[in-house]
Each structure stands twice: as C-alpha cells, then as structure tokens.
Amino acid sequence: MALPINTLSSLHTLQDDEDHKPRLSKISWLPDILVFHSSIIPTVLGPVLSVSLFAGSVAIAALMWGKEVGLTNNVVPLLSVVVGLLLVFRNSSAYERYAEGRRDFTSLISGACNLSSGIWVSVTVPPPPTDGSQPSITRARLTEEKEEAD
C-alpha cells in the first residue's frame, strides 16, 4: 500500500526543515557558541558592551590623570544588602510558583480519583447473554471486587 503523494511531499518538506535547523555539534564547541538565532546573546550584547565601554573609559581616564577610582566602604554593604534582598524575593517567588504547581497537581489527582471512583460505583452487571450461556460476571462477584478494591 503506497502513501499518497501529498503525504510523501509533506514528509520530505518536514525533513528538509529539520535538516536545516541549527544543531549542537558533538565534535567542536565553537559552532555552538556562534549560533545567535533564538539565543539570549543579541538581547544581552548591547547592555554588556555599553557597561564594558563605560568601565574601560573610567579605567583609562584614571590611568591618564593619575586619580584613584574606587568604591568607598559605605557602598559595599549597601550593595550586598540589595543583592541579598533580590535573591530572597526571587527565591520566594520561585517557591510560590512551586507551591502553586503542587496545589494544581494535587487538585488534578483528586479530580482523577473522584472521577474513577464515580465510574467504579456506577458500574453495573452487564445484561445476561441472549444465547443462554453463563454471564461473564455475577452481581455477587462484582460486589466482591468492589469491596476488595476499597
């Protein structure tokens, strides 16, 4: 049995698309670094370069005019407090997302259990066969199985 032509051509098109996607190289790491498509590098490159140029210009100016450029001891504790607060709030928001996911998963499990128990309670004995043979299960056996499952 042959597949229709349009199915084969669509599979060929999909395979061509897959073949032209950027792949992680198993031999060299350099091609992987140079992949900019769907990367964070174009987004971060501008701010990183601007801060680097500013820091470089301050360092060159300090060397040219002989002035010492540095932070006072009052700034460092303030920065450490700010970074600490940022880490705490980030951690608490991550825990809130985890707790919400756990709550949703618990709700999903509870709903699945309620659904399955509702189906199990609603199961009845199948109608007797019309050809005169024995039924596949009796009411007593069905009740026993339900009691064993609880």
Image (cartoon, rainbow, N blue to C red):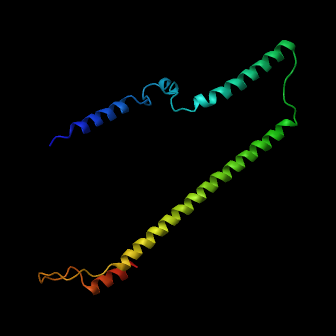
Q: Specify the farthest residue to the bottom.
A: 140
Residue at horizontal 38 percent and vertical 79 percent from the top: 121
Answer above or below: position of 123 versus 84: below
Q: Does residue 120 appear left or right of residue 34 in this picture?
A: left
Residue at horizontal 78 percent and vertical 43 percent from the top: 82
Q: Does residue 122 appear left or right of residue 81 in this picture?
A: left
Residue at horizontal 55 percent and vertical 60 percent from the top: 102
Between 30 and 97, the one nearer to me in the picture: 97
Between 1 and 76, the one nearer to me in the picture: 1
Answer above or below: position of 54 versus 74: above
Specify the quadrant of the image occupied by residue 127: bottom left
Between 124 and 10, the one nearer to me in the picture: 10
Residue at horizontal 50 percent and vertical 27 percent from the top: 35
Answer above or below: position of 13 versus 105: above
Of the 4 image quadrants, the one containing the C terminus is: bottom left
Q: Does residue 60 appear left or right of residue 24 in this picture?
A: right
Of the 4 image quadrants, the one containing the N terminus is: top left
Instruction: Tell me where residue 92 appears, x and y as whole percent.
Output: 68, 53
